[in-house]
Image: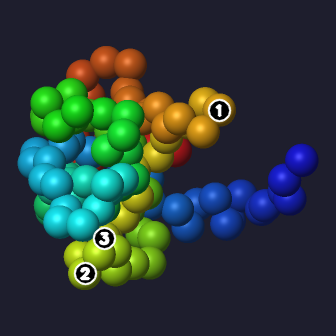
Amino acid sequence: MSEKIKFDDWSKLDIRVGKILEVEDIEGADKLYKLEIDIGDEKRIVCAGIKKYYKKEELQNKLCVVFVNLEPKTMKGIKSDGMLLAVDEDGKPTLIIPEKDIEVGSKIR
């Protein structure tokens, strides 16, 4: 079981509904996509290791859940500014998506 955190720690996380606007291959990366994601008040570039599991067409215009205030990380020369949230099903990621059409940028609490 994982360590318990205080509610104040949870409230520091900025997790929002995003919409994937563009999906691009990254040269030399067999696992990563470069995604442009609308998070309501801005658009972000996020690199996600989901290429083996999702076709570009499946991701285009898909709603998703984005961890917004994660420290940026450079992957294959691209600054990734956020993280898509997914469930790990025996090593296969399944994106977490809202159950209904909801406003992009909505905060998850």
* N-term-proximal mark, 1 vs 3: 3
Disc number placed over residue 77 in the picture, else none: 2
Disc number placed over residue 80 in the picture, else none: 3
- 87 sits left or right of 106 in the view: right
Residue 61: tell me if it is visible: yes
Residue 26: x and y in percent read 19, 62
Q: Which residue position holds label 1?
A: 90
Amino acid residing under circle 3: Ser
Residue 96: x and y in percent read 44, 33
Other residues around mark 3 within 10 Å, as few (<14) / some (14–19) / many (≥20): many
**x 37%, y 27%: residue:** 98
Residue 37: x and y in percent read 19, 52
Amino acid residing under circle 1: Asp
**Circle 1 or circle 3, nearest the eye:** 1
**Circle 3 or circle 2, nearest the eye:** 2
Q: Which is nearer the eye, 54 or 86?
A: 54
**x 31%, y 70%: residue:** 80
- 44 sits left or right of 82 in the view: left
Per the image, label 3 sits on a secondary structure element best described as strand
Amino acid residing under circle 2: Gly
Can you say whether 47 is above or below 18 in the image? below
- 48 sits left or right of 43 in the view: right
